[in-house]
Amino acid sequence: MTPRLAVTLNALGLYAIALVLLAAFVLQITLSELPCPLCQLQRVAFAALAVGPVLNLRHGPRPSHYGMTLLAALFGLMASGRQILLHILPGDAGYGSAILGAHYYSWAFVGFAAAAAATAAMMLFDRQFGDRDTPRLGTFEKAAMGLIVGLVLANMLNGFAECGPRICPDNPTGYWLFGG
């Protein structure tokens, strides 16, 4: 794998992460369902997944950047796995609406597992690590970084609007910022 292909694949990874964060945001608004604390942690883990690809785009592919992504994926697997285990008993309706037959946290578990597998696969291609020059970024890569930064900031503001400076309630019913 050439360093250029690695840069393109990292940008595609950022678009995939952005799609997940955007989908969570859109579903939250359209279904009027506030994310619970574990849902918030999963969003943090998806944001953390983006750190490795962003560093790869800014400074060139490095094994340590991929390692950061793997750690974020493991954190996300733990958070989403915990929520799956909370709702595993027969008759438990789960938290929030089901999307295509599964809850967001179940899809998140699949997403984190896929991210871990894709990151591990990327690390198998040593040729991308040979070039220590900072990659030249095109509009595609710059847009991916801008999109992910914007969505992470929007999710941070959303989390503050929901919980404020206090601990988030287990079953949120309104936004703290708007008196809920």
Image (cartoon, rainbow, N blue to C red):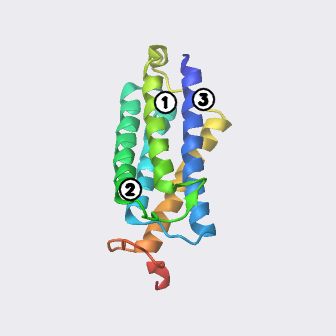
Residue position marked by numbered label 3 in the rendering: 8
**Quick check: 65 left or right of 6?**
left
Q: Which mark is residue 74?
A: none
Query: Where is residue 179 drawn, in percent x and y?
Result: 46, 86
**Quick check: 11 left or right of 76?**
right
Counting residues from the start of the chain, the first of labels 3 and 2 encountered is 3
Q: Are marks 3 and 1 in contact (CB under 8 Å)?
A: no
Residue position marked by numbered label 1 in the rendering: 118
Helix, strand or loop status at disc 3: helix
| Label 3 – label 2 distance at C-alpha | 39 Å
The residue closer to the viewer here, 56 or 35, is 35
Residue 126 visible:
yes
3 or 2: mark nearer the eye: 2
Residue 50 visible:
no
The residue closer to the viewer here, 93 or 64, is 93
Residue 1's place in the image compared with 36, above or below, is: above
Q: 10 Å neighbourhood of mark 2: few (<14), some, or many (≥20)?
A: few
Task: Check disc 2 and give the amino acid type.
Answer: Ile
Residue position marked by numbered label 2 in the rendering: 88
3 or 1: mark nearer the eye: 1
| Residue found at x 42% / y 54% | 42
Residue 115's place in the image compared with 87, above or below, is: above
Task: Check disc 3 and give the amino acid type.
Answer: Thr
Give the residue at the far bottom of this rendering.
179
| Residue found at x 51% / y 55% | 104
Q: 10 Å neighbourhood of mark 1: few (<14), some, or many (≥20)?
A: some
Helix, strand or loop status at disc 1: helix
| Residue found at x 56% / y 16% | 2
Query: Where is residue 102 drawn, in percent x and y?
Result: 53, 53
Residue 48's place in the image compared with 34, above or below, is: above
